[in-house]
Image: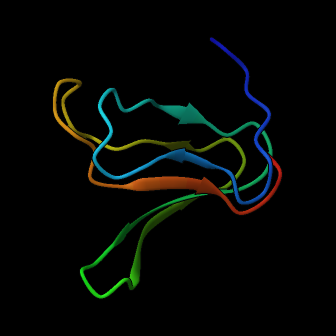
Amino acid sequence: MKKLHISKGQILQKDGELNSKIYHVQSGLLRSYSIDERGKEHIFMFAPEHWVISDSVPPDEPTMLFIDALEDS
């Protein structure tokens, strides 16, 4: 398992990317969300310490969610 150090505000995944990853949060806070056609964010979930966050699409399909860090993680 590869460990990442993510800065607050860093985007880990963007809508439409392929090969969604699964992130296990050891510290910090991540969130997943979508952005509608008007530019409004819709939060799907928050992932605090010891939670897992991902987009549940098959590996060969584009992701539907953004994932970013709300805290250094």
Q: Where is residue 50 in the image (x, y as percent from the top left)?
A: 67, 41
Q: Which of 3 and 35 is in front in this view?
A: 35
Q: Is residue 5 left or right of residue 14?
A: right
Q: Is residue 70 depicted above or below 53 in this figure?
A: below
Q: Is residue 15 depicted above or below 1 in this figure?
A: below
Q: Which residue is drawn at 24% across and 81% down?
A: 37
Residue 41 found in image quarter = bottom left
Q: Which residue is drawn at 47% across and 31% down?
A: 22
Q: Residue at x 80, y 48 (%)?
A: 7
Q: How is this picture coloured? A: rainbow
Q: Where is residue 32 in the image (x, y as percent from the top left)?
A: 47, 59
Residue at the limit of the structure toward the top, as seen here: 1
Q: Position of residue 64 (x, y in %)?
A: 27, 53
Q: In which quarter of the image is the N terminus?
A: top right
Q: In this view, does 6 lie to the left or right of 63?
A: right
Q: Is residue 1 depicted above or below 72 in this figure?
A: above
Q: Which of 66 and 45 is in front in this view?
A: 66
Q: Where is residue 42 in the image (x, y as percent from the top left)?
A: 38, 78
In this rendering, the count of numbered labels is 0
Q: Is residue 70 depicted above or below 73 in this figure?
A: below
Q: Quadrant of the C terminus?
A: top right
